[in-house]
Image (spheres, grey):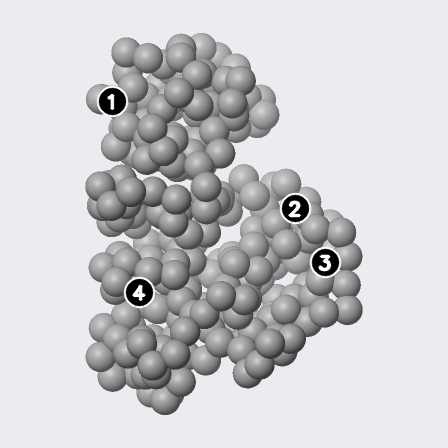
Amino acid sequence: MAKRIDISGLTAYYRDFKAIDDISMHVEPKSVTAFIGPSGCGKSTFLRTINRMHEVIPGARVEGKVMLDDEDLYAPGVDPVSVRRVVGMVFQRPNPFPTMSVYENVAAGLKLNGRYKKSELDDVVEKSLRGANLWNEVKDRLNRPGSGLSGGQQQRLCIARAIAVEPQVLLMDEPCSALDPISTLAIEDLIGDLKTRFTIVIVTHNMQQAARVSDRTAFFNLAAVGEPGKLIEIDETDKIFSNPSVQATEDYVSGRFG
């Protein structure tokens, strides 16, 4: 079941460097929220704090609160691995497990969670590949390496792998930046389908993509190189692109900087 995200006063560090400063927002369930802004403004760092991927980097730490419905994801005793089961992630470049077949790629997370029954795995693999709009393209090659698929197919395979464990939130860090226009369109169509089941947050450098796929858009910026990134404005996507409240947002979406 898709969940609401509430973030308050979130600041993230890489050792002594403050990457993002005092960010607060909420993300509604079964919606798509896009993060836009110039390179280096902390969009991906902020995204990674939502499923505790940020702290994988040595010396990285977070202050503030990330709530998934009523659960504090950074509360003492909360296992980061369990957080990543409910908050899935799709990365910038397709990263199927290279030695695994298409089937094994999708089933990998289920096996880690202790689900081994073949009939159950078969059902979830098919359901997930259908959910990623990939089943018809790979149903006759399930036992071939996932790395043998095209780039767009590999990214949809990674989405199938992420949704197979039934997360409540799906994070996407520039999922189309390495893809051709046709594959990009397929992923964008897929995002529209997936938001009926998941809460989705996407980082994108492509403002047209943000306008096409998201319900709400958040604009991030930084005052100067070396300064922390800040959330400048978040609102309904139509408003951000047609009538933003902050001049810096207007300047960015109109192409005057960035």
Residue sitting nearer the eye, 251 or 245: 251
Sequence-first tag of 1 and 3: 3
- Quarter of the view holding residue 250: bottom left
Sequence-first tag of 1 and 4: 1
Residue annotated with mark 1: 137
For mark 1, give the secondary structure: helix
Residue annotated with mark 2: 80
Q: Are marks 1 and 3 in contact (CB under 8 Å)?
A: no
Q: Whole-Å distance between the Cαs marked 1 and 4?
A: 30 Å
Quarter of the image that includes the N terminus: top left
| Within-10-Å neighbours for mark 1: few <14, some 14–19, many 20+ | few
Identified by mark 1, the residue type is Glu
Sequence-first tag of 2 and 1: 2
Q: Whole-Å distance between the Cαs marked 3 and 4?
A: 29 Å
| Label of residue 207 in the image | 4
Q: Whole-Å distance between the Cαs marked 2 and 1?
A: 34 Å
Circle 2 or circle 3, nearest the eye = 3
Residue annotated with mark 3: 60
The residue at 23%/59% (across/down) is 212
